[in-house]
Image (cartoon, rainbow, N blue to C red):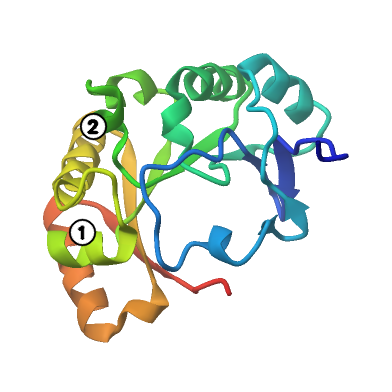
Amino acid sequence: MKDKKDIYVYKIKDALYVNFTNKCTNRCNFCIRNTNNGIAGFELWLDKEPTAEEIIAEAEKFTGLKKMVMCGFGEPMIKIDELVKVAKYFKEKGFYIRVNTNGQANAYHGRDVTKDIAGIVDNVSVSMNAPTAAEYQKICNSIYGEEAFDHMIDFAKKCIEKGIQVTFSVVDVIGKENIDKCEKIAKEVGARFRVRPYIK
């Protein structure tokens, strides 16, 4: 048994980050979990996943912040019920809410969960990282195989249809040609696009 307290909420710069789960539908080659126990000095492997009430209690210990990022050392939208409760609670307190996701939540839950987050989540940042289904699976090793790519694109479209801002992101190590192709797809879908640095 680890002699540590699980970290459910932590602060980076001017935002609170929520660590919902370590579960994920991908096993990305470049994932920080392959080489680190956390980020920014916070150890994020969990012995116990938090309830929405535990997250809210931890988050309320911080003051003077109005941004919250739903992430986790895993895929936060696996915990959709907890995510919705926390997002709704802090949205009512005037927070800007962002979700970092791989965009496979609808496939995981077998329904359109973008309906659940509409009106309470401001921005969904979807990790894209490849311009084709085959390349995506080669990099991300999803449990859904090459279908994962289409699940991701469809998820982004459904978010946009419901008025949720979507940003597709890619890591800068995939090469300029692939970055350009990903940006083109983002524009076609109606999403924003961001290149983020690879964290070693």
Q: Residue 174 vs residue 72: left or right? A: left
Amino acid carrying mark 1 in the image: Ala
Q: Is residue 58 above or below residue 28?
A: above
In the rendered image, the quadrant that contains the C terminus is bottom right
**Residue 33 appears in which quarter of the rendering?**
bottom right
- Dot 2 lies on which element? helix
**Residue that protrudes farthest toward the bottom in the picture:** 176
Q: Earlier in the sequence, mark 1 or mark 2?
A: 2
The residue located at (63%, 18%) in the rendering is 51
Residues 127 and 49: in front is: 49
Neighbor class of circle 2 (other Cα within 10 Å; few <14, some 14-19, many 20+) is: some
Residue 7, above or below 57: below
Is residue 21 in view from this perspective? yes
Give, as a three-letter code, the residue at label 2. Answer: Ala
Report x, y in % for residue 124: 38, 42
Task: Report the disc number at residue 107.
Answer: 2
Name the residue: 62% across, 18% down: 52
Q: How many marks?
A: 2
